[in-house]
Image: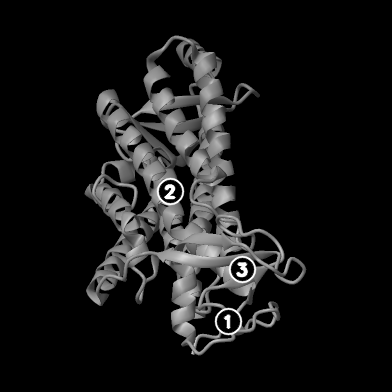
Amino acid sequence: MNRLLWLPEYPTFQPEWDLHVEDIQNTFFKCISWQMEETLDATNCPYHYVCDRTYPPNFPLAVDVLVLLFTSASYLVTLFIVVMDMMSSGRRRSERIRSSSSSSPNRYLLPSGPISLPIIILAFAKGSQINTIFPLSFMGPPILQLVLISALSFDYGADDKDIKYTFFAASTVSGILHASLYLDSIVLPYYTGFDALVSSTFSGECGTCVCRKEALVVGGKLVKYRGWSVTTFLVVGVLCLRILCRIMCGSESEGENGKLLLLKGLTERLSWISIAIDCVYLTAKSPTDRGLLRGAAFGGILLLICLHVLKEACTHIYAMASMAENMKWKIPKFTFWACAKANKTGKIMNPVSIRVSDYSSSNNGVRVTCARAISAQLKPTFQGCLSM
């Protein structure tokens, strides 16, 4: 039996009719119209509500299974690409990390890609009837968070032309907004029914007649999460800024480009923080007793967030190491001139020793090995480059 109706923190709930607990819960969670009726007891029952309309019956079990398999495949694709990005290493890793995902054929299978996102929107549009073993009233928020993470992590189409890139980015923006609206049409009745279920007392006049001390609002007051939220608009803002940066990359005003890049980076960081806050909040406040399902869903989202943080940290470490290595082997031009002049005048004809470093670089197919010559005649140390 579902124990949600007997939560100790809501002791005012006392069922007074002979209906199965599952039937009561499903009726409240699927109710889309709560009618307030007149009451004769203004002291004990100032607000009297009854559910007069619910969603249609659920789809067959096969639909839930298909949605479950599709969501699992989308998550595994996202996790695979993130891990592959982390495994890529080398001095030019920071330059390849953005283009690796955009040039991969797997970008079309990402949750924010042109194939998966329309399917997710379709599932959300019919989500009120997908409520058997994979209820979207509960699994919808982590699926939307997966779409947002995918849109932030992978700038797919970055190697395409401006028109094609703008089209894909604008399509992603439209898809995210539609998915958020459809998700609200699923979770708002769910949260409203949850509030009516646990914060009210049953009047006994009918199966869904409840008495409340305060008015019942859309979405309830127990769970504050919404699909159409600040997090969604932050991610949409990031995508719009990417389009602007792509369009203005060829302009002559470098100052404006720098401001856009700075604003885009700040918005991306705020988006990640907001997604993490929503994930932690839903983990603690989600109105469900399915602990295993809740742990798997939000644990997977938190794993992707942690991997992104680790990936960004590795990127910065590689970039700093590469910069330090380049600064270490940077040779001033006046040193070349001094060494050449000394060799031309013959002052460095018999050097005491020549030490060849291990550092070699390739430039236009010519291998250059840096050497340090120490002269017996002159105290200063000259550096030279000998073409091999």
Query: Nearer the observer, disc 2 or disc 3?
Result: 2
Mark 2 secondary-structure assignment: helix
Residue toward you, 21 or 292 = 21
Which residue in the protein does label 2 denote?
Answer: 180
Image location (x, y in percent) of residue 50: 53, 67
Q: CA distance from mark 2 to mark 1?
A: 29 Å
Question: Which residue appears farthest toward the front when viewing the image?
Answer: 40
Q: CA distance from mark 1 to mark 3?
A: 18 Å
- Residue at 48 percent across and 79 percent down: it is 24
N-terminal of the two: label 1 or label 3?
Answer: 1
Colour style of the rendered protein structure: one colour
- Residue at 56 percent across and 73 percent down: it is 209
Inspect this view and state whether residue 286 appears: no
Image location (x, y in percent) of residue 38: 62, 62
Mark 3 secondary-structure assignment: helix
Which residue in the protein does label 1 denote?
Answer: 5
Q: Quadrant of residue 168?
A: top left
Residue toward you, 155 or 386 = 155
Image location (x, y in percent) of residue 141: 46, 59
Task: Give the crowd class for mark 2: few <14, some 14-19, many >=20 residues within 10 Å.
Answer: many
Left or right of 331 on screen, residue 245: left
Say which amino acid is labelled 2: Ser
- Residue at 43 percent across and 59 percent down: it is 186
Q: CA distance from mark 2 to mark 3?
A: 21 Å
Residue toward you, 47 or 263 = 47
Mark 1 secondary-structure assignment: helix
Task: Give the crowd class for mark 1: few <14, some 14-19, many >=20 residues within 10 Å.
Answer: some
